Image (cartoon, rainbow, N blue to C red):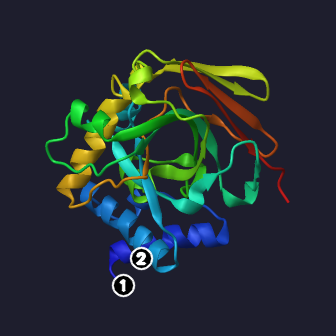
Amino acid sequence: MSTLDDLAEGLLQAVRLHSPIPPISARAALTIDDAYAIQLLQVDAWVRDGRRVAGHKVGLTSTAMRRQLGVAQPDFGHLTEDMFFAENTAIRAERFLQPRIEPEIAFVLSRPLRGPGVNVATAIAAVDFILPALEIIDSRIAEWEIGIIDTIADNASSGGVVLGSPPVRPDQVDLRLAGCVLHRNGEVVATGAGGAVLGSPVNALAWLANVLGERGVGLEPGQVVLPGSMTAAVPFDAGDVVTSVVAGLGSVTARLGESA
């Protein structure tokens, strides 16, 4: 096996054994392209096991996080259909290693979207509706000791998604100004707005379509895109109930069940 195969297998094994691994960036000199190759090796393994790609997520959309990791642009990961959980239904804590949670505005596409050349107008025209969402981020890297190589290789630290309702047409809300209040166990723990996501979540959608297009991949009708968090991530421990309220969109609640 190649080094990339070995590193991908190590991340897959971390999930199987429910045991985080040391940063992979410390084990080999890797490029951003190497990290995405490791991510895709895992996605290929999931697909062989019968899992289906149902969308994508964009990460590192805040200037502070990009500065912290020393990168100039966001990253992306894959969302599989088994990462989606029903709202207000207890999610098994054993599904994750070290979860955190953050509020997002989810796009659901009505038509194909493929770069290069996607701009904001093209991107929003491909959106069927938007929903409030909570993304459960997780890391297979011990203690969240991650750099850009680690998080990309680890599928952009993807874990799970909870979508709210009802669907809202994208022309009904100014996504830049949509305010968000995040509650954890009844207490306000963070506030933010859509403008925290690259100036507008639509900018993140266009960025994703163009970057995927450079890699020969397009976004498909019915797929979900998470454009990035409106606040910093907060802890999501067994027994927690987290609710995001987004102006003009409504709310969404995620519950993490007690550990077995």
Q: Quadrant of residue 36?
A: bottom left
Q: Nearer the viewer, residue 55 or 234?
A: 55
Q: Quadrant of residue 194?
A: top left
Identify the residue at horizontal 79%, vertical 24% (top origin): 186
Q: Which residue is mark 2?
A: 6
Q: Quadrant of residue 162?
A: top right
Tell me: residue 255, above or below residue 184: below
Residue 2 position in % (x across, y down)? 32, 80
> Could you say which disc has been placed on residue 1 in the image?
1
Q: Where's the C terminus, which quadrant? A: bottom right
Identify the residue at horizontal 55%, vertical 18% (top origin): 247
Q: Earlier in the sequence, mark 1 or mark 2?
A: 1
Circles 1 and 2: CB atoms closer than 8 Å? yes
Q: Nearer the viewer, residue 221 or 225?
A: 221
Q: In the image, is 193 to the left or to the right of 133?
A: left
> Could you say which disc has been placed on residue 180 in the image?
none
Question: Which three-letter amino acid code belongs to the residue tagged 2?
Answer: Asp
Q: Where's the N terminus, which quadrant? A: bottom left
